[in-house]
Image: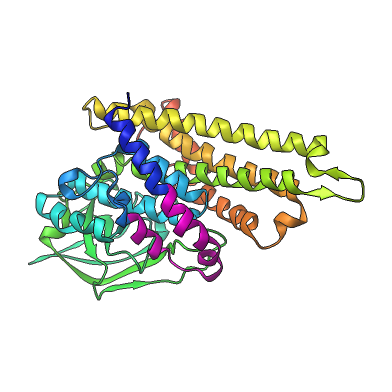
């Protein structure tokens, strides 16, 4: 017998396959070449109800859980990592409003999500590098709310999102963890955006976001002043989404290179590419790495949903460390698989095309905050007891 959760997942699979086959996959190369933001993809995902995948039904969502979200991000990214990242950041922003917002904020910002309304988070600043949760900017109180004057260095969907969840220091902040979040309308006249000309994931438009004398009414403060630390430390969608995107990209690379090995022949010696032991060995190596990646992801997302079903509302320390570890492992592994694919395909893989695009896209995972070197440092400090705090100095 299929239970309610399994039935919901099967429905999501069917909806997702249709969107990917008809919209996301056919447009992926053009989005990359022309640096087109995947708004049409986000609209199609909204039509099928997938943009509210974590939201409760009374807000128009599917209430499908983190496993379903991870599966969607993974499948999308197997064809278009740019769309996978845009989707991840939207889900994170919507989830933050659901978890910390007032009823009025939830009704205003989340009910339109299934009509194509989408958001993103904006956190990182040039002055703190990969530690995107640290801000040197500060909000300023006004009689009617707040004024924001700041620049964010990387904001996915910059210039295209309908709303931004912007992180900055609280007005009287004296410590790095005294941060606040504000919901900003995408049409606010004080917003301006940089250009996005990147090596890979060229469709996600993670450019700078500048807020110049942006006036924010009191009702757009997310949570209370200084509650931003809790928002950062309970965020799940971001790291899980990143890990899922890089796992999906790895699977997409495996599909390409496997088909290449099957169909290509060296007619001068009468051999198929698969007749060479070195090629078979490389292919097997890539497949084994991908299987290890998917096995860990399946275990992790099941664990996350189970912990939430138990009613804790927060992940255990061990699972939080697993999330960070998986971000590192997934982005490292997809780059290893991309290199193996390039070795197998040679000049064909080097030419502009789908594999070349995937090879470039994979590079983003290593530097995306927290960068892998920084993430390893944070994890190691926690494991050996130097510090379990994100907010102090990192050596």
In the picture, measured across the screen, residue 305 lies left or right of residue 267, that is: left
Of residues 131 and 272, the one nearer the viewer is 272
Q: Which residues are magenta?
A: 17-45
Residue at 36% x, 69% y is 159
Q: Classify residue 149 by image quadrant.
A: bottom left
Name the spot of residue 69 as percent of width and height, x first: 36, 42
Q: Is residue 191 magenta?
A: no
Residue 347 seen in the current view: yes
- Per the picture, the main secondary structure of the magenta-coloured stretch is helix
Q: Is residue 162 above or below residue 101?
A: below
Quadrant where the image shows the N terminus: top left
Name the spot of residue 366 as percent of width and height, x first: 54, 47
Name the spot of residue 89 as percent of width and height, x first: 36, 52
In the picture, measured across the screen, residue 354 lies left or right of residue 105, that is: right
- Give the total number of marks visible in the rendering: 0
In the picture, measured across the screen, residue 94 lies left or right of residue 157, that is: left
Q: Classify residue 107 by image quadrant.
A: bottom left
């Amino acid at each position: 017998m299929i239970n309610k959760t399994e039935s919901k997942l099967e429905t999501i699979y069917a909806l997702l396959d249709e969107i990917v086959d008809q919209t996301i996959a056919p447009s992926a190369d053009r989005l990359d070449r022309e640096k087109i933001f995947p708004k049409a993809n986000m609209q199609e995902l909204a039509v099928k109800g997938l943009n509210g995948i974590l939201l409760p039904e009374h807000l128009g969502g599917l209430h499908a859980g983190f496993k379903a979200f991870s599966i969607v991000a993974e499948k999308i990214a197997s064809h278009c990592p740019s769309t996978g990242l845009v989707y991840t950041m939207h889900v994170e922003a919507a989830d933050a409003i659901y978890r910390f917002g007032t009823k009025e904020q939830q009704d205003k910002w989340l009910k339109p999500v299934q009509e194509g309304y989408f958001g993103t988070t904006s956190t990182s600043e040039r002055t703190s590098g990969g530690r995107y949760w640290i801000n040197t900017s500060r909000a300023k109180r006004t009689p009617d709310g707040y004024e924001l004057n700041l620049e964010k260095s990387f904001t996915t969907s910059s210039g295209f999102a309908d709303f931004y969840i912007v992180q900055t220091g609280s007005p009287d902040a004296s410590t790095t963890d005294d941060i606040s979040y504000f919901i900003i309308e995408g049409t606010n006249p004080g917003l301006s955006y940089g250009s996005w000309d990147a090596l890979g994931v060229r469709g996600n438009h993670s450019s700078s976001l500048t807020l110049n004398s942006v006036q924010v009414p009191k009702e757009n403060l997310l949570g209370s002043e200084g509650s931003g630390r809790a928002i950062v430390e309970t965020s799940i969608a971001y790291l899980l989404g990143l890990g899922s995107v890089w796992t999906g990209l790895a699977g997409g690379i495996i599909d390409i290179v496997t088909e290449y090995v099957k169909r290509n022949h060296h007619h001068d010696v009468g051999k198929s590419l698969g007749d060479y032991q070195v090629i078979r060995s490389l292919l097997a190596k890539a497949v084994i790495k991908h299987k290890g990646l998917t096995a860990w992801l399946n275990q992790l997302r099941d664990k996350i949903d189970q912990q939430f079903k138990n009613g804790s509302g927060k992940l255990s320390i061990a699972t939080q460390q697993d999330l960070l570890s998986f971000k590192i492992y997934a982005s490292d592994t997809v780059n290893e698989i991309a290199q193996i694919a390039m070795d197998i395909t040679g000049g064909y893989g080097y030419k502009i095309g789908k594999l070349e695009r995937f090879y470039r896209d994979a590079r983003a995972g290593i530097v995306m905050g927290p960068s892998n070197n920084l993430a390893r440092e944070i994890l190691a400090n926690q494991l050996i007891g130097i510090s379990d705090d994100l907010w102090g100095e990192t050596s």
